[in-house]
Image (cartoon, helix red, strand yellow):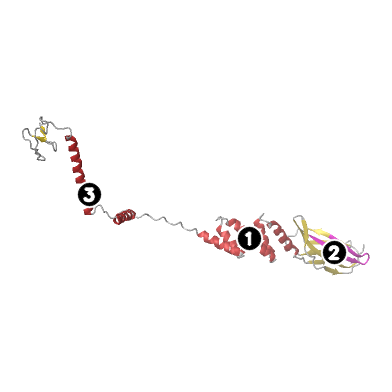
Amino acid sequence: MEYCKKCGARIDDGSGVCPVCGHENSKDENGGNGEKKPGSTKNIVLATIAVCLIVFALVLVALVATGVIKGDKGEEEQTEEELIEATEAPDETEEPATPTPEPTPDPKEKDYEKAMQFLDNKKYEDAVDAFKKLGDYEDSKDMYKKASYFLAKKYYDAYSYKKAIKLFDGLGDYKDSKEYSDRCTVQLFIGQQPVIRIKMAKGDKKGKKPMNVTWTPIEGADGYELKWQKKSTKNGDEDEESEEASTSHTIRFSGSFKWIRARVRAYKTVSGKKYYTAWSEPSQIRRVTKIVE
């Protein structure tokens, strides 16, 4: 078996000419026995590598020529930008995301703000009504008490004691509401004045002459204090008094008298202290009668 000295290809026996590269081989070159020399395999490997490099270079040139690979740096950057834009561009095939609905505002929020404006502007009547309608919203209950307290003090300063008492009593232990309620009660009470009247009744068989004294009732009174004075022909002026729970009293006495004068006032106990109304205008009756004792 003979091999080509140049390319290592197989040569038919006796031919001497390589059918691949055309090199003429002599027997002396092949060592006389046609055996391949030790360097033939290395040459084949190098030839194969060379062919691969040539093919790779041709493919690379072809790619650059067709624009698949751009050698310009600016074009490469432009391609990257285009790739980024393509990545960021929305996919028209996908369904758009459903927007999150905004929370519905609570209608009481505006009412609360309006109520606070009433309170800040000292429109306490409007503030009380507004906070009352809000019920348990936020701190409306506390704000209702605050507005009611200021409104009650406003009534107190305006001498509208009945209105003030109603509000202060409704506030219970809020701040000094109890103290103000007592003040209003006292002021309302002492501002009243009873009207008294004296009428003489028929005397009995013993000669005693009863005097019926009556007066108008006072709202909230716990009782009444009655004082009377008589001027007798025998003993001169005499003063007497009594406390009554009702609105009438009968004075009984014997003897002669010139006149009897009486007056009355009401009293009320508030927080352990006794308060009185003004005295009534005095009422008197004149009569001189000789009583047989």
Which residue does the image show at 73% across and 63% down from the upper left? 187
SS label for mark 1: helix
Which residue does the image show at 71% across and 57% down from the upper left? 179
Which is more foreground, mark 1 or mark 2? Answer: 1
Residue closest to the eye, 191 or 201? 191
For disc 2, the marked residue is 228
For disc 1, the marked residue is 148
In this rendering, is residue 39 above or below 221?
Answer: above
In this rendering, is residue 126 above or below 8?
Answer: below
Hey, which quadrant is residue 268 in on the image?
bottom right
Q: Are marks 1 and 2 in contact (CB under 8 Å)?
A: no
Query: Is residue 236 a member of the stretch shown in magenta?
Result: yes
SS label for mark 3: helix
Whole-percent x and y of residue 220?
73, 60
As drawn, which residue projects farthest toward the right? 234
Give the distance between the C-alpha atoms of the residues marked 1 and 2, in whole angstroms.
46 Å
For marks 1 and 2, the one nearer the N-term is: 1
Q: Name the amino acid, label 1.
A: Ser
Whole-percent x and y of residue 267?
77, 60
Residue closest to the eye, 249 or 78? 78
Q: Name the amino acid, label 3.
A: Leu
Hey, which quadrant is residue 90 in on the image?
bottom left
What stretch of residues is rendered in magenta?
224-241
For disc 3, the marked residue is 60
Residue closest to the eye, 60 or 239? 60
SS label for mark 2: strand
